[in-house]
């Protein structure tokens, strides 16, 4: 195994799930460390210093969210939570507590790998002390953060200030899910956190302006009940 | 129809300053008092009207006039027929006419009552008193035209004896006109004395005649005796005593020697006198007693009639609060008491009732008495042997199944005790009320039991449907998995790929089934949290399409959502599931590559969303049934299985949002499912800023 390979910590109490995660992630070249309980998980994180954590929210001996709070006090290491489908409330709590993304069980390996790649890429960018990202490109969309312009197939699309702010933050976190609350706070400020429809309406505007078929978006994806995600690569 | 034309042509305002002059002398007097009364303020509330109905043809007119009056003053009205001795001997045609009149009154909205009694006027007033009647309407034609000796008409009698009740007389021209009662007591006394005098005079005259004819003294005494008895029966004890005295005097003066002088020669006359006196007293006492008993019988009849009415009313009431209120009201009215119904709570304890109009219900000692009665199924309280110190009488309400509650009555106006026969009657009432309350309890229990049975039935059909649909994909996965496990090396690569694909696909199917089942359990539990928020419709359509993903295969999707569609108010997770279910159906029941359309349209305070396909469409008549649980289209593709829960879940979601959903056949082939989501108010305003 390549010792430069990224290390992923799996904190999950169900053995079959650990088995297939181990198998598929191992095949992708990741180094795996495992923990079965929350306490074990904290120990593994502090000792092994993984590059990414896969955390199951339904651990028997503890609250996954508590682990997130704990880790976030001293590290920005990416955390992806594994949750049950339909459990939107807990997903939002985890994301607002500092998790980077989520996966709803049952999930496929393809989705998992995509999210892991996005999370690692973001982490790398944050950790580098290099210049800030000046532009972002995905498919036919190109966002220029410096000049505050967006181009679809090289044609500029006019956006209002707030629309661009919204798009920018999604682009800087491309591939990651951002909750309504997070977007409200970042774009409108902390005093607007109780008006989720603001985000929805402006996202609707963005979709109308940027998407070929607004009702079937290609880039600006909706995570129902949780928030939005700009499609990464 | 006949009635309405009558109403229209004869509608005259009661407040007319100059009513049409009546043609009748009685009414002329009355007209004067009416003019004085015009200045009176409006009729008070809580009026109740009583109209006397008889076989005479004018009764129909009287009934209609009473109806008009009751409409005008917004009062309940009662049509009463008093069956006197005379009425029992009515001719057939009279009887039929009477029934017609009663039916007419009933059809106009009156309560029909028939009672029996001796004197029409007395019975009328009695009954009116017992029902808190405020106005009586009668016709001027007295149905009993055979008059008593003293020629007083029904109207005058009513007017004299009615006390606080207004008397309305329907004159020739149909307008009930009110009659002023003259001052009462003086006339009463005066008339009895006048009557006494007259009777005495008549008796004397007769005696004189007989004397002239040659009757013996004994027979003359008989005549006077007759007079005394008559006076006692009609006018009272005092009058009869005076008559006795006067009779003896007269007899002495006129018929014994020495004539025209008051002398008592024969001590026998003393004997005659005392006998007459005693007879007079006895006669009056007897009459009083008979009257009293008749009175009691009448009162009991009325109370039983009230009980019968109460029972009938109670059968129609199914709300327990209303039941209790109705009972308390009726008992208070019939017995002239304060009435409270005590019902136990779950641990069979009687608690004080705070805030009841009958204030004694809040007292702790009263409550203790009620508890004792409840526990021992025996009457207690004032007037009984148990706990006579309390201020009310406590009657247990019991059925053969046990004691349901306690009826407490407190006599009004200082009279603290209720007589034994009233206690008896209250007991009867209490039993009836207990039956009514028990019936209500049993009805509710039976409803709950039915609900439980329904839930059980649903659970078992769910179980049987689910076990099949769960086992099938599991079987496929188990089979494919074990084949790969056992024979991996010997399987060709494309076979391996197929088996693996099977495992993935069947897992997907299983996953969706579990999803649906979870939704269904949550929704049929009834306690769904519908998190309604303002959001754009196109967003939830987009995410539903995204979730369907590869399942949409090559079906082209046409989306028709207007740009200016207002925000909807709904739970995004639930509506996304709804759309996924509809899209799943569209894929299941239509051919590959056939187009699927999604449309949205704004309507008045709701948004309509429609999903349509070009598949086989619905079987005629199934438009409603498709939303039933476990319904599956008869011609579903055999390899596209499903529990038939999809549309049932859609309907439950839409209903939870207060909307409607329906499925119709698309003209040109295919199915359209359309649902409407209502919204309240308008979305909160946003701060719109300028474009850069």
Image (spheres, coloured by chain):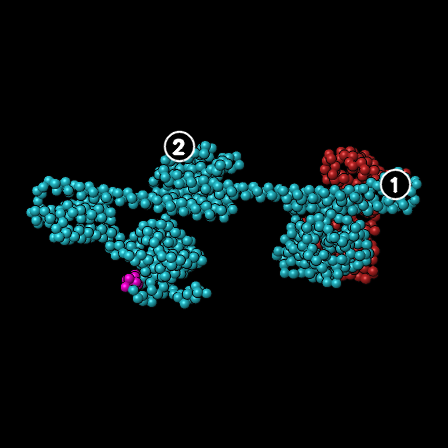
Residue A88 in the image: state x and y as whole percent: 71, 45
Q: Secondary structure at mark 2?
A: loop
Q: Residue at x 28, y 62 (%)?
A: B26
Query: What is the chain letter for disc 1?
Result: B
Visual hue assigned to chain A: red
Q: Residue at x 50, y 36 (%)?
A: B401
The answer to whether mark 1 and mark 2 are in CB contact below 8 A is no
Task: Give the number of the disc on residue B484.
Answer: 1
Q: Give neighbour class at mark 2: few <14, some 14-19, many 20+ (Cα, 10 Å).
A: some
Q: Residue at x 27, y 44 (%)?
A: B288
Query: What is the chain letter for disc 2?
Result: B
Q: Secondary structure at mark 1?
A: helix
Q: Is residue A169 visible?
A: no
Residue B58 in the image: state x and y as whole percent: 36, 61
Task: Give the number of the disc on residue B177.
Answer: none
Q: Which residue lies under the disc numbered 2?
A: B387
B531 up-or-down from B363: above or below: below
Q: Give neighbour class at mark 1: few <14, some 14-19, many 20+ (Cα, 10 Å).
A: some
Q: Is residue B506 left or right of residue B358?
A: right
Any idea which chain is the cyan one in this picture? Answer: B
Find the residue positioned furthest to the front. Answer: B214
Q: Is residue B472 visible?
A: yes
Q: Residue at x 44, y 44 (%)?
A: B328
Callout count: 2
| Frontmost residue, B440 versus B680 | B440
Look at the magenta stretch and give its main secondary structure.
helix
**In the rendered structure, which segment of residues is drawn in magenta?**
B25-33
């Amino acid at each position: 195994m390549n010792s430069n390979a990224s290390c992923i910590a799996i904190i999950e109490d169900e053995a079959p799930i650990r088995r297939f995660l181990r198998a598929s992630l191992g095949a992708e070249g990741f180094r795996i460390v495992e923990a079965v309980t929350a306490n074990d998980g904290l120990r593994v994180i502090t000792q092994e210093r993984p590059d990414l954590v896969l955390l199951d929210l339904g651990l028997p001996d503890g609250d996954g969210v508590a682990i997130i709070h704990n880790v976030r006090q001293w590290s920005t290491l990416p955390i992806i939570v594994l949750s049950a489908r339909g459990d939107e409330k807990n997903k939002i709590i985890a994301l607002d507590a500092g998790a980077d993304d989520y996966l709803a069980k049952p999930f496929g390996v393809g989705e998992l790998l995509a999210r892991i790649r996005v999370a690692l890429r973001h982490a790398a960018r944050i950790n580098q002390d290099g210049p800030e990202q000046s532009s972002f490109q995905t498919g036919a969309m190109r966002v220029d953060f410096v000049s505050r312009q967006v181009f679809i197939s090289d044609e500029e699309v006019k956006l209002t200030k707030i629309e661009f702010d919204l798009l920018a933050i999604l682009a800087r976190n491309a591939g990651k899910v951002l909750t309504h609350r997070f977007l409200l706070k970042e774009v409108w400020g902390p005093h607007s956190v109780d008006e989720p429809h603001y985000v929805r309406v402006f996202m609707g505007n963005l979709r109308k302006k940027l998407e070929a078929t607004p009702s079937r978006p290609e880039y600006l994806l909706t995570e129902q009940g949780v928030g939005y995600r700009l499609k990464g690569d | 129809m006949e009635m309405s034309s009558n109403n229209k042509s004869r509608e005259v305002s009661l407040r007319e300053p100059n009513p049409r002059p009546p043609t009748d002398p009685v009414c002329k007097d009355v007209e004067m008092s009416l003019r004085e009364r015009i200045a009176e303020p409006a009729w008070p509330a809580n009026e109740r009207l009583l109209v006397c109905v008889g076989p005479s043809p004018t009764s129909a007119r009287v009934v209609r006039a009473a109806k008009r009056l009751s409409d005008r003053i917004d009062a309940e009205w009662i049509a009463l027929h008093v069956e006197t001795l005379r009425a029992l001997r009515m001719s057939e045609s009279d009887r039929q006419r009477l029934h017609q009149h009663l039916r007419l009154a009933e059809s106009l909205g009156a309560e029909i009552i028939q009672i029996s009694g001796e004197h029409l006027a007395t019975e009328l007033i009695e009954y009116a008193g017992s029902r808190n009647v405020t106005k009586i309407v009668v016709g001027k034609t007295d149905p009993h035209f055979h008059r008593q000796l003293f020629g007083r008409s029904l109207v005058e009698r009513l007017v004299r004896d009615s006390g606080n009740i207004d008397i309305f007389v329907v004159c020739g021209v149909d307008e009930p006109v009110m009659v002023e009662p003259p001052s009462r007591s003086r006339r009463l006394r005066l008339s009895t004395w006048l009557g006494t005098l007259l009777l005495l005079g008549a008796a004397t005259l007769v005696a004189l005649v007989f004397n002239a004819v040659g009757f013996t003294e004994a027979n003359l005494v008989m005549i006077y005796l007759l007079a005394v008895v008559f006076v006692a029966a009609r006018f009272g004890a005092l009058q009869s005593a005076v008559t006795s005295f006067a009779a003896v005097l007269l007899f002495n003066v006129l018929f014994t020697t020495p004539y025209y002088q008051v002398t008592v020669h024969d001590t026998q006359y003393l004997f005659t006198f005392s006998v007459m006196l005693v007879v007079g007293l006895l006669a009056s006492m007897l009459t009083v007693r008979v009257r009293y008993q008749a009175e009691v019988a009448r009162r009991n009849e009325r109370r039983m009639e009230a009980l019968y009415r109460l029972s009938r009313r109670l059968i129609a009431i199914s709300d327990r609060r209303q039941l209790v209120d109705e009972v308390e009201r009726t008992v208070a009215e019939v017995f002239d008491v304060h009435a409270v119904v005590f019902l136990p709570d779950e641990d069979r304890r009687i608690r004080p009732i705070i805030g009841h109009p009958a204030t004694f219900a809040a007292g702790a000692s009263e409550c203790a008495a009620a508890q004792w009665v409840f526990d021992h199924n025996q009457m207690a309280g004032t007037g009984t042997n148990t706990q006579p110190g309390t201020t009310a009488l406590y009657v247990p309400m019991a059925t053969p199944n046990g004691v349901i509650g306690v009826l407490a009555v407190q006599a009004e106006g200082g009279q603290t005790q209720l007589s034994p026969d009233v206690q008896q009657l209250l007991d009867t009432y209490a039993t009836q009320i207990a039956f009514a309350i028990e019936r209500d309890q049993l009805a509710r229990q039976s409803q709950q039991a039915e609900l439980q049975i329904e839930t059980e039935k649903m659970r078992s059909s769910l179980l049987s449907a689910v076990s099949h649909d769960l086992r099938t994909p599991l079987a496929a996965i188990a089979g494919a998995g074990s084949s790969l496990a056992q024979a991996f090396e010997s399987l060709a690569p494309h076979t391996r790929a197929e088996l693996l694909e099977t495992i993935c696909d069947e897992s997907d199917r299983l996953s969706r089934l579990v999803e649906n089942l979870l939704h269904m359990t949550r929704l049929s539990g009834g306690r769904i949290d519908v998190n309604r928020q303002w959001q754009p419709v196109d967003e939830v359509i987009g995410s539903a399409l995204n979730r369907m993903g590869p399942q949409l295969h090559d079906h082209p999707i046409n989306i028709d959502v207007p740009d200016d569609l207002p925000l909807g108010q709904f739970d995004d997770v639930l509506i996304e599931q709804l759309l996924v279910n509809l899209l799943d159906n569209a894929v299941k029941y239509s051919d590959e590559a056939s187009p699927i359309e999604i449309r949205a349209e704004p309507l008045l305070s709701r948004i309509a969303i429609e999903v349509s396909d070009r598949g086989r469409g619905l079987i005629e008549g199934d438009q409603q049934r498709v939303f039933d649980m476990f319904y599956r289209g008869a011609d579903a593709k055999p390899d596209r299985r499903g529990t038939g829960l999809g549309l049932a879940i859609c309907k439950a979601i839409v209903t939870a949002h207060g909307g409607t959903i329906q499925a119709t056949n698309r003209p040109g082939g295919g199915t359209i499912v359309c649902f409407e989501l209502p919204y309240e108010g308008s979305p909160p305003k946003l701060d719109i800023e300028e474009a850069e």
